[in-house]
Amino acid sequence: MKRLAVLGSTGSIGTSVSRVVARFPDRFAVTALAARGNVELLARQIGLHAPRIAVVADEARAKRLAALLPDSKTEILHGPEGYAQAASLPDVDMVVSAMVGAAGLLPTLAALSAKKTVALANKETLVMAGALVTETARKNGVSILPVDSEHSAIFQCLQGQDRSALARLVLTASGGPFRILEKEALANATPGDALRHPNWTMGKKITIDSATLMNKGLEVIEARWLFDVPVDNIGVVVHPESVIHSMAVFHDGAVLAQMGVPDMLVPIAFALSWPDRLPLAQLVPDLASMGKLTFEEPDTERFPCLKLAYQAAREGGAYPAVLNAANEEAVGAFLDRSLSFPGIAEAVEDALSAFPAPGKLELEDILAADAWARARVARRVDGEV
Amino acid sequence: MKRLAVLGSTGSIGTSVSRVVARFPDRFAVTALAARGNVELLARQIGLHAPRIAVVADEARAKRLAALLPDSKTEILHGPEGYAQAASLPDVDMVVSAMVGAAGLLPTLAALSAKKTVALANKETLVMAGALVTETARKNGVSILPVDSEHSAIFQCLQGQDRSALARLVLTASGGPFRILEKEALANATPGDALRHPNWTMGKKITIDSATLMNKGLEVIEARWLFDVPVDNIGVVVHPESVIHSMAVFHDGAVLAQMGVPDMLVPIAFALSWPDRLPLAQLVPDLASMGKLTFEEPDTERFPCLKLAYQAAREGGAYPAVLNAANEEAVGAFLDRSLSFPGIAEAVEDALSAFPAPGKLELEDILAADAWARARVARRVDGEV
């Protein structure tokens, strides 16, 4: 019986985790559920899983949640301390880190420091503070298991393989909803257009990131830390069918690829049940019926975010944190229609070039870089820089 | 240092093994080389590897070989006893079984009985006597490592995986040189046409087998024994680019595939160096440049050999040995222009339907079935049945 703390339980990943747990009750139990503000869904999940602890963002929401659950024995916590507490409970074996954006960093560090295996869906954690997070995992002797489809694919491909023979990683990208749109048309792309992802059903932030290819850039940085491969040995190929989820290339010329239908259930379940596989009885792609799988180079002229991510990764230090924070704010501004679609990449590029690189790189420097980049984008949106 | 006995050293696989050994002299040494009749090439290989033992098919060839190597210390043996001796030398760690056709069976059994790991390129061994061969390996506590590209692909995909979660195997087939030829045109196909394989450079027998799809049928039966998967859970998909070499499907919906350029060097080297991978620095397929990978169902109406192989595998017993022997003879007759291209499948079908099934299934029954099928095809070629 694996006992879970699910951080971000009401999001896209969290609800899938909840489904897997409900389907395999002899394998998993939920000790803690944490969400930001969707107290109605969280209340239903508490009813289903009866966790010992539930956490929401603030006291007001904690009160609303308590009001929805008059007879529940679940203890309700709130705020950053609540999240950190849920991430480090003694009766938890695995923490699912699936909060959106930079908010996932501190609870993930808390989980690793408390020697919990972390199933990591929050890529921003590794983008912002990859060195710190992987070092914390190493020092505490615990594993970070990827939940992202691409990283799960690579993780699956690397099982039982000669790791010294790993030469390169290749992440596949669907290309997003604007793959074949002319550069000129991108200037008029609306949030509604960008949210229509061709293959994957995901949260808003990650769907916009898929449209800009920033998602793939963040994944390159995530892969760099998860698999300890230099970013220049990580490639990206656009594969609109999203059947091949990613690939590992070995120094003998062999390439291992993981394939499947585009459904997050498989990677989520693999992280939960690793090294076993759960009998999900998912459909598998019928290649003969599909007829073909197609591939193309990513176009970093129309989608400069991918190039910016490589650039930030090569710079290292706090630059990936700046990239990530500037992107989060810019995506928010785009969703609010305060920035155009190309304005997202422009805001990120501006933040990267204006950022005053700090001398050292402790957690505080990363958080300061994060705050600096957010303020910079806000000023840019307001026309101040 | 791994000490090898290479059976079939002058064939397509054997020469690649020789190249790998020559390239990694700190990892491999050759204790024995065995070939059928190409004494000139064998003499060169003896000069290169200085094995303790060399074997050829008969005394006349042994004398010719000795005459080519007046100063060599290599002991020269001949005939079936010579092959069996080379396969079971005490100072050999791994036997590479790469003889063509049914001739590989007895030396492979000798190697397994002498507790040698076998790198198996000779698929006929498992097709004829899969139960006996795998049981011999099990009883002696040794492994059979696949060398065939498709089986190596699956073997690579299964490393470190939850074997209880394995649901299906999918073998890819190039479709061969006649993939898009009309049924009517197949009747006039010549050996020269059939020997022009689009992707792989291989021996004559296997190239004709690729043109009839019998090669894929034999591989289905081979996979059934190597991976202990029922034939009805083994599928075939035609994939003309031969980039995906085969796939393993798990019960969670994940599919693992091994890819690479179509070069036997990678699977050969993996069998030799397993579980490590050698730094071969092979090219890897550039999917973006290729643009697409294509797939289609195999057409068993134009290529009935694939259907016949499934049928023989389902019947079990000595039927796969009959399938294999009838096919070997029929391919020989086609190469001699005594049979038409469609005549190969017809001769195999005739042998399968005329075969009087034996009650038990010892090695003698398998060899008797093999001899019976060869005689049947010979009579058919002569117009007697």
Image (cartoon, coloured by chain):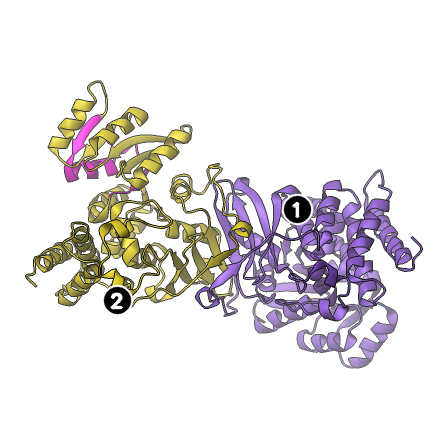
Chain colours: A yellow, B purple
Q: Residue furthest left?
A: A384
Front residue of A109 and A38: A38
Mark drawn on residue A225: none
Query: What percent of the width, then of the height, locates residue B359?
Result: 84, 38
- Tell me the quarter of the image containing the C terminus of chain A: bottom left
Q: Residue furthest right?
A: B384
For residue B70, above or below residue B92? below
Q: Chain of mark 2?
A: A
Inspect the image, locate mark 2, and give the three-letter code of the amino acid beneath it.
Gln
Please say if the residues under marks 2 and 1 sit with CB atoms less than 8 Å apart.
Answer: no
Inspect the image, locate mark 1, and give the three-letter code of the amino acid beneath it.
Arg
Q: Which residue is mark 1?
A: B224
Could you give the CA–CA distance between mark 2 and mark 1, rounded to whole angstroms?
49 Å
Q: Which residue is mark 2?
A: A311
Give the left or right position of residue B111, taking residue A285 as reference: right
Query: What percent of the width, then of the height, locates residue B18?
Result: 65, 71
Does residue A23 appear anywhere in the picture? yes
Identify the image quadrant of residue A27: top left
For residue B110, above or below residue A118? below
Give the left or right position of residue A313, taking residue B292 as reference: left
Residue segment shown in magenta: A75-99
For residue A72, above or below residue A373? above
